[in-house]
Image (cartoon, rainbow, N blue to C red):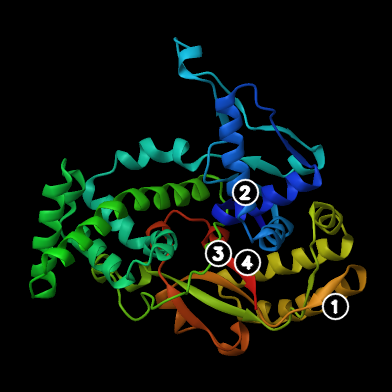
């Protein structure tokens, strides 16, 4: 369906967990106590994932998979052993050829930090506002109020010079002062410290999120964002940064249901993945989906309707050739300009069609069409 997909976080851990268990990926053997500790920490992190099935599904849909895990894929030697520098070697000792043919590791932080750091504070603040759903994804487990995060990001958009503030107390004071002007009332000491700490951490988390999107753009890859629509989203509250943009430049994450897909392959392990990826019925199914993506993004209603029938037939053929399970409703999030939403016809895009957020707005001009797809899932 896509040429490439970038897997990070729990999806990257889920794929590694399954591949290590099946023997398709093997980890390096520790040579020092420090290396043993690094490997134990990584294995513990990987084993916490509960997203193996989702990770395998993304690998099934994409031609190429880029793995961007939330930990280093290098083992580092003790500093005292290497006085002239840090010696490192790969954490992944071996990857089976049938897996390495489409799987490649990447590092979004190393590849893009210098580029994003060179941006002016205003551009960074605008980007942080644009990627709020991605920042929230890393915040929500900590019990942070989403309204507080949004207020913090609005403050940064209005006062981007705060991003360059050297000390945390000075930063907190600036955030509180600007927030009080924005909301028209005072904040208690506790509320101020809370807001200041959220804004302070949001700068780091925002940079990580921006680098992920830059890497996806660089790889021309889809970047899945699990749980994108949890909580109240920007559909009901347009961020400050977007109020100054022309509506035709705003891209909404639009949830699109495809009722024609009734069955999905049962993926238990890497062996199932490799077998189904090469099956003729699934290749034809992916081709029908790919052609529908192109038609949807072109706004070709007639082609979309015809291709949905092709998808239905290909899905039925897939069920006959592979072990499949009946699913509820299959959906995707499609990045579409807001100005185009009024032109969409519900018989083509299914019911309901809902706006989920503005995740990729900042990349609307640079992204190629297939790069505007955010996530695929089933319910």
Under circle 1, the secondary element is helix
Which residue has dot 3 on it? Answer: 373
The residue drawn where x is 72% and y is 76% is 307
Measured in 3D between alpha carbons, the distance from the residue under mark 3 to the one under mark 1, in whole angstroms, is 25 Å
Q: Earlier in the sequence, mark 3 or mark 1?
A: 1
Under circle 4, the secondary element is helix
| Vertical comparison of 194 with 319: above or below | above
Q: Earlier in the sequence, mark 4 or mark 1?
A: 4
Under circle 3, the secondary element is strand
| Image side of residue 60 versus residue 172, left or right | right
Q: Residues within 10 Å of mark 1 (few under 14, many from 20)?
A: some
Q: Earlier in the sequence, mark 3 or mark 2?
A: 2
Q: Residues within 10 Å of mark 3 (few under 14, many from 20)?
A: many
Tag count: 4
Q: Nearer the viewer, mark 4 or mark 1?
A: 1
Name of the residue lying farthest toward the top: 84
| Image side of residue 76 versus residue 203, left or right | right
Which residue has dot 2 on it? Answer: 46
Residue closer to the observer: 238 or 328: 328
Which residue has dot 1 on it? Answer: 316
The residue drawn where x is 64% and y is 51% is 47
Q: Earlier in the sequence, mark 4 or mark 2?
A: 2
User: Picture quarter containing residue 98?
Assistant: top right
Q: Nearer the viewer, mark 3 or mark 4?
A: 3
| Image side of residue 331 versus residue 249, left or right | right
Residue 62 image point, x, y percent: 69, 55
């Amino acid at each position: 369906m896509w040429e490439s997909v970038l897997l990070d976080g729990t999806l990257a851990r889920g794929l590694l967990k399954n591949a290590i268990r099946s023997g398709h990926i093997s980890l390096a053997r520790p040579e020092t106590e420090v290396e043993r500790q690094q490997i134990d920490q990584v294995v513990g992190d990987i084993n916490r994932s509960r997203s193996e099935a989702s990770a395998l599904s993304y690998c099934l849909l994409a031609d190429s998979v880029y793995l961007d895990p939330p930990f280093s894929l290098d083992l580092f030697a003790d500093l005292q052993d290497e006085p002239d520098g840090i010696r490192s070697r790969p954490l992944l000792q071996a990857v089976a050829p049938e897996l390495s043919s489409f799987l490649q590791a990447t590092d979004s932080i190393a590849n893009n930090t210098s580029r994003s750091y060179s941006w002016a504070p205003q551009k960074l603040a605008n980007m942080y506002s644009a990627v709020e759903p991605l920042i929230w994804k890393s915040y929500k487990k900590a019990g942070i109020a989403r309204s507080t995060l949004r207020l913090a990001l609005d403050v940064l958009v209005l006062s981007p010079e705060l991003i360059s503030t050297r000390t945390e107390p000075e930063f907190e004071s600036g955030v509180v002062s600007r927030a009080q002007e924005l909301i028209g009332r005072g904040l208690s000491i506790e509320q101020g410290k809370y807001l200041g700490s959220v804004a302070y951490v949001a700068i780091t988390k925002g940079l990580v999120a921006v680098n992920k999107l830059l890497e996806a753009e660089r790889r021309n890859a889809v970047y899945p964002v699990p749980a994108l629509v949890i909580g109240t989203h920007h559909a009901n509250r347009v961020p400050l940064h977007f109020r100054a943009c022309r509506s035709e430049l705003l891209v909404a994450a639009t949830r699109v249901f495809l009722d024609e897909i009734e069955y999905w392959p049962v993926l238990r392990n890497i062996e199932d993945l490799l077998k189904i990826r090469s099956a003729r019925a699934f290749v034809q199914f992916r081709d029908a989906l790919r052609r529908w993506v192109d038609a949807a993004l072109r706004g070709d209603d007639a082609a979309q309707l015809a291709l949905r029938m092709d998808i239905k037939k290909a899905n039925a053929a897939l069920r006959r050739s592979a072990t499949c399970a009946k699913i509820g409703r299959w959906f995707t999030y499609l990045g579409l300009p807001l100005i185009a939403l009024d032109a969409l016809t519900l018989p083509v895009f299914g019911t309901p069609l809902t706006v989920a957020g503005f995740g990729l707005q900042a990349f609307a001009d640079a992204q190629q069409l297939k790069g505007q797809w955010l996530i695929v899932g089933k319910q």
